Image (cartoon, grey):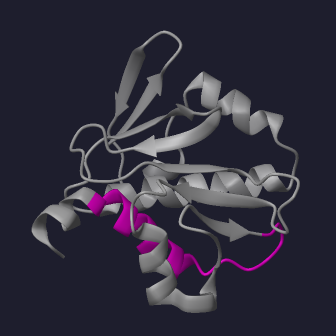
């Protein structure tokens, strides 16, 4: 299931989704406006990351409803229903970065360190907070899907010791 939260009016809409349906899930208006503010082709690539997050959530046992909202003005994906995971954000990087956009994780988790240990130089990383991407570059989708799955189940795994 995908839950779209409208933080400005504090309302939400639940939409039951799975697999391909997740990719066409309704987007809260404020999140859509944020995506629309970004230039092409970066917008399309960030939308692909969104699709990957939603599809992975719908395929991962125990994740439950995903809340799509804005955190710090950036699209964020939370496991509000089950609290199984850690927040994922997606956004362009700052102008000083050699990369164009990123998938951000809470830096107090060990997620990015785990990604680095498991996938090495498959990705570029920013400290303990992000996996970095460049517009037009190939993305290791299967590996990124596993990173997303690890984030969406972070609290499940840390409680169970896995």
35 within the magenta span: no
Q: In this view, does 54 lie to the left or right of 29?
A: left
Image quadrant where residue 93 sits? bottom right
Q: In this view, does 62 lie to the left or right of 142?
A: left
Q: In this view, does 55 lie to the left or right of 41?
A: left
Image quadrant where residue 135 sits? bottom right
For the point 43% across and 48% down, the residue is: 87
Check the image and report above or below for 152 versus 22: below
Of residues 142 and 78, which is closer to you in this image? Answer: 78
Residue range of the region highlighted in magenta in the rendering: 134-154
For the point 39% across and 24% down, the residue is: 13
For the point 21% across and 67% down, the residue is: 157
Quadrant showing the N terminus: top left
Residue 59 in sight in this render: yes
Image quadrant where residue 161 sits? bottom left
Residue 19 in sight in this render: no
């Amino acid at each position: 299931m995908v839950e779209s939260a409208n933080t400005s009016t504090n309302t939400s809409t639940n939409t039951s989704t799975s697999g391909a349906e997740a990719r066409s899930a309704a987007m809260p208006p404020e999140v859509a406006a944020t995506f629309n503010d970004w230039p092409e082709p970066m917008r399309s690539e960030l939308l692909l990351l969104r699709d990957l997050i939603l599809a992975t959530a719908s395929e991962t046992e125990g994740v439950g409803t995903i809340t799509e909202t804005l955190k710090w003005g950036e699209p964020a994906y939370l496991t509000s229903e089950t609290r199984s995971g850690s927040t994922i954000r997606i956004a362009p990087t700052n102008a000083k970065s050699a990369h164009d956009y990123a998938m951000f994780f809470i830096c107090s988790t060990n997620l990015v360190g785990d990604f680095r240990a498991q996938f090495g130089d498959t990705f570029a990383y920013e400290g303990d907070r992000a996996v970095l991407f460049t517009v037009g570059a190939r993305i290791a989708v299967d590996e990124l899907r596993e990173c997303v799955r690890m984030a969406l189940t972070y609290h499940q795994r840390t409680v169970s010791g896995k």
